[in-house]
Every structure is written in C-alpha cells, then in structure tokens.
Image: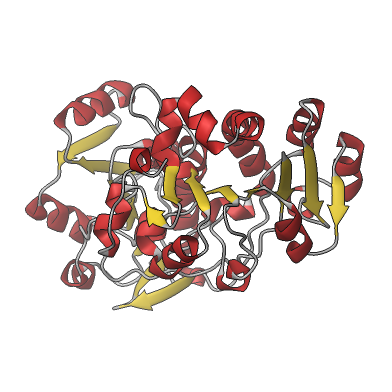
Amino acid sequence: MIIGVPKEIKISENRVGLTEAGVRQLVLQGHKVAVEKDAGLGCFITNEDYIDAGATILDTAKEIYESSEMIIKVKEPLPDEYDLLQEKQILYTYLHLAAEPQLTKVLCDRKVKAVAYETIEDARGGLPLLTPMSEVAGRMATQVGAFYLQRDKGGKGILLGGVTGVKRGRVTILGGGVVGVNAAQMAVGLGAEVRIIDVNHSRLEYLDHIFNGQVTTVYSNQLNIEESVLESDLVVGAVLLAGRKAPKLVTKEMIETMSPGSVVVDVAVDQGGCIETCRPTSHTNPTFEINDVIHYCVPNMPGVVARTSTYALTNVTFQYASIIAKLGLEDAVKANPLLEKGVNVYGGSVTYEAVASDLGMEYTPYSKMI
C-alpha cells in the first residue's frame, strides 16, 4: 500500500502521524511511504531521518493526497485540506466528528473511508488510541491552569499548593477518566485541594482507592457541581462520551458565581466542550475572559509538547496502521473486529451511531455497507 503522511496545518500543531521508526517498519513490510517535506520538524524528526528510514519526501500536501491510498494524520482535516481528499481513500486520524458537521459531510460526499483514533475500542471497551493524548492533556490542564492563576496572567494570584500558614488552591475536575486522573495527579503533586466529580459510583470508589484520601470524590449532580464550581480557583472539564458531544455540565450561571481571576480549562472542547461558556481557541490565542473568569479551550493541547505526544501516540496507533496497510480496511476489520468501531464514515454514509445522532444524520452500520 502507498501511505501518505501530510504536515499538520492546525495552529501550533507540531505532532506528526508517523515517526521514522514507523516508516521503517512499514517499508520493511513492503509498503511505500511518502512524507510531506518538513512534516516532522515540529517534533525534531528531520526529512533526512525519514529518508534514512525509507520514505520518499514530497514537497506539497497535494502530492501526498493524490499519490496515497491511506493518509495517516494526527488531527482532523481542516477546510484547506477538504479538496485534497480522494474517493475511497483511507483516512486514519483523530476526527471528533460529533463537533464537525461540515467535515462529516465532506467525508461522506467524497466517500472517504474515515477511521477515527478516538472511537477504536479494545476488548474491555477502553479507548486505547485516545488514552496517551488524554494523559498528556490531563497533565497539561493542571499545568496550564496553574500558569493562568498567576496575577501577571490575569489570574487571582493563587499558588495551587499554597505555603505554610496559607490556604491551598482549590481544583475541581469534572470527570474521573484518564484526563481527570492525570489532571488530579498533577494537582495533588502541586499540593492543591482537589475534588473529582463523576457520575459512576464504581469509578469514584476506584479513585478513592488509588489516591488514598488525597482527593475528595463527589457524585455528579447539578447541586454538587454548582457548589464545587463556586468554591474553585481552577475547574478542569474532563468529560468524555465516546464519539459524542460532551454534555454541558457547567452553565454560564455557574461561571458567573466564580470569583474574578479564576480559571477554567475545558479539555473536552474538541467534542463540543462540557462548560457552556467555552469555545475553541488556539495556542496562539489560547484564552478569553467571561465575567473575569479566564477560559483556556485549546482543542489540540498536546500539540505544543509535540515530541512527547508524537511518540506516545504512534506507539498505539501503529499496530492498526500496519494491519490496515497489510490487508486493506475491509479485511483488516474482518481480521480485527474491534477496529470496526473506528470506522466513522464509509461509502458515503456515517457508520458510527453516536456521530450520526449528534449531527442529525442518517446512520448506516458499517456491516451493512460491505
């Protein structure tokens, strides 16, 4: 198979879909790999590194898309890339289509075989290709929140860990999944007072166990969320419903109760966000204020720690890339049925039910398309 790796064009997105190690492995397996010029420089992988691994370097994204049977990316195609997509081309990347109606329509119209990292499940129902970036984003959320709490950044001048004789900062984390756990680990490490809110009682028991009393677990309901947001210096939105838009758990009215200089970080913004007042921002203009509360809502947070993120991501995405390249998408799904959950668009139809439901589009199971 001919595999193409374009350069990411999202603002401050420095990750790349394949490392030089992945290229070498695919070439050894008999495939051809084309990498767009300078695609890896954001994470310090040079064109020469790719050439040494057996890749061909092409000058433009247009050449990559036109010559490739499968495209391996990190982030969803942006409007400038829509016209480059080819009919029946395999697109393997993060898609988050529940928040992208225009892209979903383009993928359907062009009959792209779109495989989303974030909806591929393992045998236990976990999301193995989302996990490493959730770990990065969770840790960054606390780090970023602590940064914007500084007075010179517009925050209330709170040191999360406090010092002797001074209260610690208060952090509320909405969601006890991978993002939430990693955000909590960072916050606990900094010495903050941490509260995790989740609707799954078994998950709360697990969090009590692993944190050994270092965090307070709270059952998710509107009253508990309201009280927690009101009392917090930093609120982290870490809610995930696989493939679906995130529920709006924090309302505008709750934000208005927070004290000036507080910070909210919505990691769920790439799925629509779980904080009503949030909207997507970028690494070049990452924050805005509503009622003097600082909002940080960058969808591709891991993009600025690109080297760590790229190697963590490709460690888990490569195995599926390899089987798709070897067998083609259809036979790869037959050989590994868990891959079917990743197929979001196929043959002009939406084949992931949650995406179709959220976008009001017709759902056709992948099994009926082949």
Residue 103 higher or lower than 326, as above or below: below
Residue 188 seen from this side:
no
Residue 217 coordinates in the image, percent (x, y): 20, 36
Q: Residue at x 28, y 34 (%)?
A: 215
Locate residue 96: give its quadrant: bottom left
Residue 294 coordinates in the image, percent (x, y): 39, 70
Locate residue 284: give its quadrant: bottom right
The quarter in which the N terminus is drawn is: top right
Of 25 and 241, which appears nearest the observer?
25
Residue 153 higher or lower than 348, as above or below: below
- Residue 122 left/right relative to 252: right
The quarter in which the C terminus is drawn is: top left
- Residue 72 left/right relative to 331: right
**Color scheme of the displayed model:** secondary structure
- Residue 302 left/right relative to 151: right
Of 240 and 360, which appears nearest the observer?
360
Residue 65 seen from this side:
yes
Residue 90 coordinates in the image, percent (x, y): 58, 48
Residue 364 coordinates in the image, percent (x, y): 31, 49
Furthest-left residue in view?
223
Q: Residue at x 86, y 35 (%)?
A: 53
Q: Residue at x 29, y 56 (%)?
A: 356
Residue 15 higher or lower than 61, as above or below: above
Q: Count the numbered circles shown.
A: 0
